[in-house]
Image: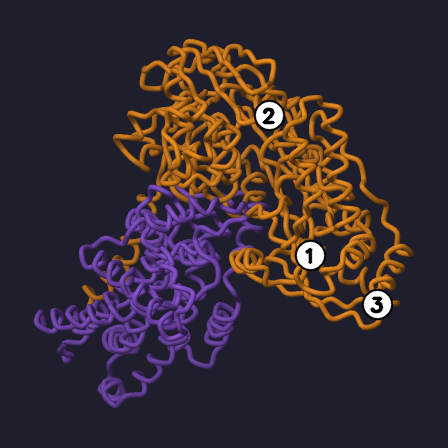
Chain colours: A purple, B orange
Amino acid sequence: MFRKIAHRLLWAIPTLWAIGSISFFIIRLAPGGPFERERALDPLVIASLEREYGIAPAPPMPPGAGLGARAANQTKHLARQYLRYMGGLCRGDMGPSLYYPGLKVSEILLNSLRTSFVLGAAALSIAFLFGIVAGTLAAWKRDTALDHGARAFAVAGISLPNFVIGEMFLLVFGLWLKVLPAGGWGRPACLILPALTLALPLSAYIARIYRASLIEVLGQDYIRTARAMGTGWFRVLFGMAVRNAILPVISFMGPAAAAVVTGSVVVERLFAIPGMGTHFVNGALNRDYTLVLGAVMVYGALLILCNILVDVAYTLIDPRIRL
Amino acid sequence: MYRFYIGLVLLPLAICALSFSLASRDTDSDFSFRNGPEPQTCDPGIATDMAGHRIARALFEGLTVFNPRTLEPEPGIAERWEVSEDGRQYTFFLRRSLWSDGRSCTAHDFRYGWLRVLSPETGSEYINLLYYIRNAKAYAKNECRAEDVGLKVIDDHTFRVELEKPVPFFLSLAAFATYFPEPSWAIEKHGRNWVRPENIVCNGPYVLKKWALNDHLLFEKNPLYWDAANVSLKKILALSVESSNTGLNLYETGQCDLLLDLPPELIHVLRDRRDYTSIPSLSCTYYRFNVTKPPLNDARVRLALSLAIDRKSIAQRVLMAGEVPARSFVPPGMPGYASAPCFEEDVERARALLAEAGFPGGNGFPKLTLVYNTSMTHKAVAEAVQQMWKERLNVSIGLENVEWKTLLHRMTKLEYEICRAAWIGDYVDPTTFLEIMRTGDGNNRTGWSNAEYDALLDVIAMEANPERRNEIMHQAEQLLIARESPIAPIYFGVNQLMHRGKVNGLWPNALGLISFKHLSPAGPDARAD
């Protein structure tokens, strides 16, 4: 198994390289640059900053130069910057933020990732417990009011956007009842509303997936045989089916965990949480090239890691599966 | 079987409990306010956003400080000063004061800080605010040595500044963050990281204790500040909250004591509340015309479009926060200058001008596009203007909403026809507005160039008599707004304030400044005064 994991980790390197390279060139296509501001910067200052951060435009060509030569000059120049950035990445250096002078991308991301991780872990745990319980009840009491209720909850959770859910939570628990803080970060109580907001749609997905999977498992021959041999419902359900039906949920949890742990810009804005989701959006809006690239790389790396963890979890749950 | 279930339930619960326990911080404070989005930096030499300047003002002090009520410059680190008769030489006499690490704050620190701003490597957006100093621009271009710049340290506590030309508002410039002193030893040791809480050395009423990115900054009273006896609040929390809606939620639930801007879509409800105050700010929102594109290359067309905007109805029906209709470029409330309307809106005249320019009744007028950056307010104003031009001039305009950096890029490259813009005064003098329309200024962004206007600006720069100077400034403004019209002013903005009455000494002013040292705890009934 360890060989397989090592193999997967090795494959992660070219994957990350591809993610980084594509993003590097795409972000440069966006109009405007990091030093284009409302108050126009002195050209002297722009030139100096672009030199410092290694994102200077290509040196001017003589006026007579043809289109081909210009394009070649441009490409060569960008390629040099690309190699420098990738070289830095290989050494674990994501470079300085172009928007926040003096801050390194790695420390910005590390700090915000810690916040997002705490929030994401709480949301995932809540979603998992809610989803499994709701899914089990729905599958067990199939086509009863309980099942319809659980399915209605799932449809609502999936279709309601989280800014609506979040605003409703805020209005009821924050502003009307005043039992929970209406945002901010730093006290455990601050975690409850955003974690629930993030968890609700996730738990709805989990409930749906789990219900379907459990119904399928309950229809299998070995369950019927066990019932025919007189095994009670309780033992059949909890001793056999629940465990065997959980695999699809686990494979859903992998990418979901990567997404939740890297933050949600909507929830972060709504509840004033210093998480990582904000950096994806603000980094792009501010043309903070290094920050956006860093955020994308971290997300990519987490996604790969979570998928590996999912495979490991498979082998723990179902001994028949080998990596 | 049970191991599986125990794992299934306990593992999520354990993760949940662990994450709850990790999410704790200690941020009790005497006073907290929403500082807006995360400041880029609190390095006074490079800070440019409002949020960064507010922080820099709490941590540092310049030669002069603004009186928060009148905005007049008052003695700060300089106890007094002398101005030479030709107005080109200022000698500042510094009081004995200390940096937060116990070193004495001297004229050398001012000279160091100013020269640092003038080095392009520093990356200061406000470098040109120092170009008033003799040879400053040449130094920035690396054409002269530091010794040639008009900054002379006579002794540790006497600092002489020589200017290129008389600058009547130099004392208020000296109160601006870009003119603050900087500790060379800390900057040389830590580079750009010198403003972090663990490295920072400051000379203002507060010191930086904590900086959590995208969350908050915590200040504590600086015991070594020269006027520490008059600083009342011990701890201040500046919340970096991006959304004004979230800010309002925090305020309503008591997690924040002061808001400095409010959600525009709620303003019609909030403006009637007792804890709300608004005051005109030194800002103007206007539309730029790209004068390089026909038919906007014709001043008559531009003026016609400008004359046909009903600014009063925009201010009262669309904006509703007390904004003032703008018929000039320089906002009211600029101390020492009476801003007067350059024209009265006149639809008949607008139609006549349009006909004169070859578009009688709007016939044959090409379809132009008005570009604005994403915002509910900008959209609402643009729609109102679009409708006014259609109804009043029979001119159809398309609207285009683009993201901020894209708009900036297109403005700079003149790839637009009409676009939304706004300008906030940097210092307390009308030239902070008038100068941006000079030929070739980086903020002109209309392609407009007028020798007469530039000549008037040159005269203003040399004129020492305030009355005569004001008169020429009015002339220049008249030319800009009512004759040439490369821009159409729409409205003057407001500084909003929502305050729970936790502190006294919060005076709303046109610059939106908070003088942290003047804040003191208030009784239970106090409100924004």
**In front here: B75 or B520?**
B75
Q: Which element is circle 2 on?
A: loop
Q: Earlier in the sequence, mark 3 or mark 1?
A: 1
Mark drawn on residue B289: 1
Q: In 3D space, how far apart are the residues under numbered discs 2 and 3 (Cα atoms)?
A: 45 Å
Q: Is residue B199 above or below residue B382?
A: above
In the rendered image, which residue does mark 3 sit on?
Answer: B359
Percent position of residue A116, x then y: 35, 53
Q: Amino acid at mark 1?
A: Phe
**In front here: A262 or B339?**
B339
Number of residues whose C-alpha sits closer than 10 Å to that of mark 2, classed few (under 14), some (14–19) or many (20 or more): some
Percent position of residue A224, x then y: 27, 88
Q: What chain does mark 1 sit on?
A: B
Q: In 3D space, how far apart are the residues under numbered discs 3 and 1 (Cα atoms)?
A: 18 Å
Q: Amino acid at mark 3?
A: Phe
Q: Is residue B212 left or right of B77 when viewed as pictured?
A: left
